Amino acid sequence: MKRIYLYLIISMLFTSGSLLGQTVQFLTLSTDARTLSMGGTGVVAPANAFAIYNNNSAATLSDIKGAFASSYTMWQPGTTASNLINVSGFFKTGKRGAFLLGSRFFLYSAYVMTNDQGSITGTYKPMEITVDLGYAFMITETLSTAATVRYIVSGMSPDASGGAVAADLGLIYKPGNISIGLTATNLGSKIDYGYGPYALPSQIKLGAGYGFHAGEKHLLNAAVQAGYLIVNSGITAGIGLEYSYNNLISVRVGGHYGDSEKCIPSYVSAGLGFRFRGLTMNAAYLLAQKDSPLANSLGINLGWEF
């Protein structure tokens, strides 16, 4: 029976786009549809309800006092048919500080369980959860830093589950229209399902962004980002463009590069955003080759800024 569970765990790790020796790969996914539609360039994303997963340090440099949102991502519908559900937000405290919080639920498709004789004994639906708490501090009016603590629970079978503690560090510098961001994410302990330890998908990401107004009602934002996966030396990169009209509607496109030799897929993305009296709604859609597990992945979110 344990051999069957071990095979299922390895299969799910690889079909979800993971790297050899790593687990909980959903930690690398964008819960923010805006970020997802712009090629995953979250390191320099403006602070919103998903700042804790983009760049936690951006919260203190925001013009708003806080934001909360929920999101749903249909991930790899043609292969794993997994679902990522998220609730998160932030609120400022005083002139320099901000608290960030969030939780993510990654739900796999159910699979059939069998005994040693091959008879079906039931079904199991693997699920992974995080609970996240962060604090950001404004060093100067253009420079902010932050740290997040994360508790992770991963259940792949009735006999294979584990937990881990991790941390994110963030730094952002925003002098005028320019943004430069740096993050180190998922730095922490390994998860042991009873068959040996698996490392977390730790990453270092560096990005730059530029935004400018073309008239009173037209805003253009551009962002680029590069990432390095610490455990397996994988490289990622992203680029994104956004056009916003009168702070009401936004159109976005992006591209993301992943190292195919490290099982990191690439994709092209597109999305829309709406904002009205503090209410926000965003959607993202991934375009990829027909044989790519990311083809037709879709993300949506609904939030409130105040």
Image (cartoon, rainbow, N blue to C red):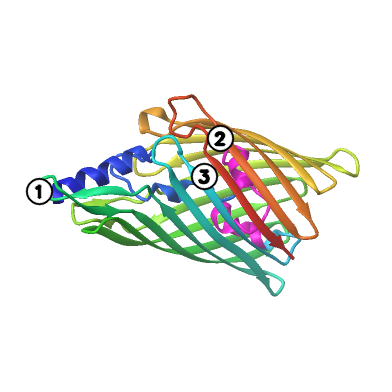
Q: Residues within 10 Å of mark 3 (few under 14, many from 20)?
A: many
In magenta segment, residue 163:
no
Q: Position of residue 97 (x, y in %)?
A: 64, 70
Residue at (14% x, 47% y) in the render: 119
Secondary structure beneath disc 1?
A: loop
Residue at (75% x, 42% y) in the render: 250
Kind of residue sitting beneath label 2 = Leu
Say left or right for 39 vs 150. right
Q: Earlier in the sequence, mark 3 or mark 1?
A: 1
Kind of residue sitting beneath label 3 = Lys
Residues under labels 3 and 1: Cα distance?
45 Å
Label for residue 116?
A: 1
Residue 91, by quadrant, is bottom right
Q: Nearer the viewer, mark 3 or mark 1?
A: 1
Where is 46 relative to 64, above or below? Answer: above
Say left or right for 206 vs 276. left
Q: Residues within 10 Å of mark 2 (few under 14, many from 20)?
A: many
Q: How crowded is mark 1: few (under 14 residues within 10 Å), some or many (20 or more)?
A: few
Residues under labels 2 and 1: Cα distance?
40 Å
Secondary structure beneath disc 3?
A: strand
Q: Do the numbered discs 2 and 3 sit on residues whose CB atoms are within 8 Å?
A: no
Q: Where is residue 253 in the image (x, y as percent from the top left)?
A: 66, 34
Kind of residue sitting beneath label 1 = Asp
Q: Which of 62 and 195 is in front in this view?
A: 195
Question: What are the residue bounds of the magenta stretch?
Answer: 33-59
The image quadrant where one finds the C terminus is: bottom right
In magenta segment, residue 47:
yes
**Which residue, given by chain and number where applicable, does mark 3 sit on?**
205
Label for residue 286?
A: 2
Label for residue 30?
A: none
